[in-house]
Image (cartoon, rainbow, N blue to C red):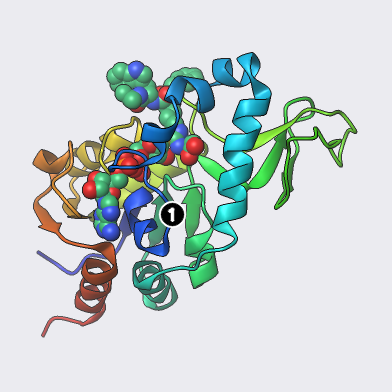
Amino acid sequence: MSEPRNIVVLTGAGISAESGIDTFRDAGGLWEQHRVEDVATPEGFARDPELVQRFYDARREAVQKVSPNPAHEALAKLDAEWEGELLIVTQNVDDLHERAGARRVLHMHGELLSALCARCEARHSWSETLLDQPACPGCGAQALRPDVVWFGEMPYQMERIYAHLRRADLFVSIGTSGAVYPAAGFVRDARELGARTLELNLERSEGSYWFNESRQGRASELVPEWVKEILTPSV
Ligand code: BV8
């Protein structure tokens, strides 16, 4: 295989697990504690906004108490040193990629530390609670919601993601179960568009079939190892 030039990395909750952030589908994960329909859909928010705001308030608070792990740090090193194209598409709503120093990051499912005004659609950095319906700094409406993509809502920047997938010659998926679309379909798109595909995950995922290579293990070990490999020019 010729040296890759353009890389797309997709990350999921598994890359943040060793930082102490619950994943969704592992034992004890978020979907064991809450019904998806109640806390991660627009219908759930309309039905019981307080329950949903509490769910995101707790995660917004928790994310400010944890730190990036060696997997986030390794991707930040790749970002700093990789001369070709690189896009880290994350399904995660935490800011650990950025706090590790990565810059070429795209949050396709939004961010915990951002509030979206349902009235004027402005986005505001937000680290506090949204439970007491604070006024939008832009339009003054008490219509701020978590700036995350719920089930049934369109993920952010899909055109930009596909533009990168079309140019990618390497697609690497890290710490995701491959359970949720359209993210779970990127590996197939990338492969059909000619990229080599690599999975780094604790266990084989629902999409493992589509990967040229699938390595099982913890992200904090597999990712630094892979970044070292990819940054070491082959003789
Ligand atoms: C849309 C943000 C259309 C919120 C999230 C039927 C068939 C196919 C699709 C559908 C269908 N019915 C409905 C759909 C669409 C639906 C969907 O895919 N449903 C699934 C359940 C079937 N998708 C949507 O609704 C999406 N929108 O389709 O819009 C549309 C079209 C036009 C106009 C409007 C709309 C939107 C989905 C986004 C939902 N939001 N998150 C929040 O965070 O609260 S989803 C959330 O779960 C994540 O963001 C991620 O995307 C997804 C999966 O989570 P993972 O990150 O993979 O985490 P998980 O716990 O599942 O797995 C962890 C993995 O890590 C495991 O494999 C584990 O082994 C591994 N791991 C653990 N520890 C480690 C580790 N790996 C390495 N090291 C470790 N230490």
From the viewer's side, name the closer residue of 167 and 82. Answer: 82
Horizontal side of residue 213 vs 11, given as left or right = left
From the viewer's side, name the closer residue of 167 and 149. Answer: 149
Quadrant in the rendering for residue 56? top right
Quadrant in the rendering for residue 88? bottom left
Q: Is residue 48 visible?
A: yes
Secondary structure at badge 1 equals: loop
Q: Amino acid at mark 1?
A: Ile
Q: What residue is at 39 percent from the left and 78 percent from the top?
A: 81
* Percent x, y of residue 196: 16, 53
Ligand 1 shows up in the quarter that is top left
Horizontal side of residue 193 vs 28, given as left or right = left
Q: What residue is at 62 percent from the left and 52 percent from the top?
A: 61
Residue under pointer 1: 21
Image quadrant in which the C terminus is located: bottom left
Q: What residue is at 64 percent from the left and 16 percent from the top?
A: 46
In the rendered image, the vertical position of residue 70 relative to residue 122, given as above or below? below
In the rendered image, the vertical position of residue 193 relative to residue 144, given as above or below? below
Image quadrant in which the N terminus is located: bottom left
